[in-house]
Image: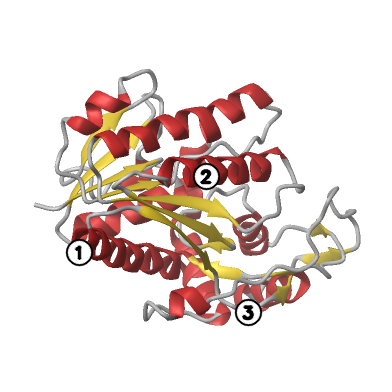
Amino acid sequence: MATVVVSGASGFLGSHLTRHFAKEGRCVIALVRAQSALHRLADVLDVVRLQCVDAGNIEDALLAQQPIDAVIHAATDYGRGGGSLARLVETNIAWSLRLAEAAVKAQAACFLNAGTALPPTVNPYALSKHQFSQWLKLLADGAETCFVDVALETMYGEDDDPAQFIASVILGCLRNAERLALTTGEQKRDFVYIQDVVAAFARLVEFHIGEQRKRRSGGYAAYSVGSGVAVSVRQVVEKIHALTGSRTVLDFGARPHRAHEVMFSQADLSAMRKLNWSPQYDLQEGLRRTIAWWRTHGEERLRCAG
């Protein structure tokens, strides 16, 4: 049975990927930290193989799972909450590189890295992700494993971290919070629904496994994944406000833009479209589905996050 390894399987993206491949009938190895909350995986825990990787030997762990079709690296440290830069670098570069090298030793057909569309100057997280991409290019030289970098735009969807922007605005509006303090909202972002992101990874796995098997060689490839449409943050917030029927006051301009704010970001989908992938959910439908999920599961998930 084909095997897919997913790092960061208990996180937002990782859990959606794990669920997709498990329900597709793949053998899924879910790499998680020992202290990870597993509520996002509750419905597939009986069909995935959990493996704790805090201090374990990643190399031996992956060798024991051969043959491996794909390793999808979704684990990351966003550097929030005043964490140390050393820990962020350890996770996003050093540990990530160990995982990539282990994928080569285990003769994985392909290694897909969940990267970021943010420029490296925005924050330490973005810098570390771009630096890891440079290491992947170096590692790809001469390896039989194919390395695939996926630059992700702003994801949103069911079961995201409640502190993430879209989720926090939805929750505030559903609760009819008295006021949401916001920036002017002039910055434009490419907001992409999580199910479209999962479909993109699934297509990339399928394509690059096929290519590696035909050519028996690796290489490096990079793709941008988003909706392909840039929308102002203000428009998105107002759309959420309308879809929730909220009475919350939207206080645009009450907060300053963050340092090094990106004022425009939009995915170039030309490479993905050559693989016959394109987004299936527009912003209206993606937000509608996300709001419906938070309306039903919001309080429960906040307890889990707390």
For marks 2 and 3 on the same chain, the one whose residue lies earlier in the sequence: 3
Counting from the top left corner in percent of width and height, residue 254 is at: 90, 57
Residue 198 to residue 164: above or below: below
Looking at the image, what colour scheme do you see? secondary structure
Residue position for label 2: 302
At x 63%, y 79%, the residue is 229
Residue position for label 3: 229
Counting from the top left corner in percent of width and height, residue 16 is at: 37, 56
Residues under labels 2 and 3: Cα distance?
31 Å
Residue situated in front as seen by the camera: 271 or 172: 271
Q: Secondary structure at mark 2?
A: helix
The type of residue carrying mark 2 is Leu
At x 36%, y 24%, the residue is 34
Q: Nearer the observer, disc 2 or disc 3?
A: 3
Residue position for label 1: 214
The answer to whether residue 300 of the structure is visible from this angle is no
The type of residue carrying mark 3 is Val
Q: Nearer the observer, disc 3 or disc 1?
A: 1
The answer to whether residue 58 of the structure is visible from this angle is yes
* Image position of 263 (left or right of 1): right
The type of residue carrying mark 1 is Lys
Residues under labels 1 and 2: Cα distance?
47 Å
Q: Nearer the observer, disc 1 or disc 2?
A: 1
Furthest residue toward left: 1
Mark 3 surroundings within 10 Å by alpha-carbon count, few (fewer than 14), some (14 through 19), many (20 or more)? some
Residue 44 to residue 77: above or below: below
Quarter the C terminus occupies: top right
Residues under labels 3 and 1: Cα distance?
35 Å
For marks 1 and 2 on the same chain, the one whose residue lies earlier in the sequence: 1
Counting from the top left corner in percent of width and height, residue 102 is at: 32, 32
Mark 1 surroundings within 10 Å by alpha-carbon count, few (fewer than 14), some (14 through 19), many (20 or more)? few
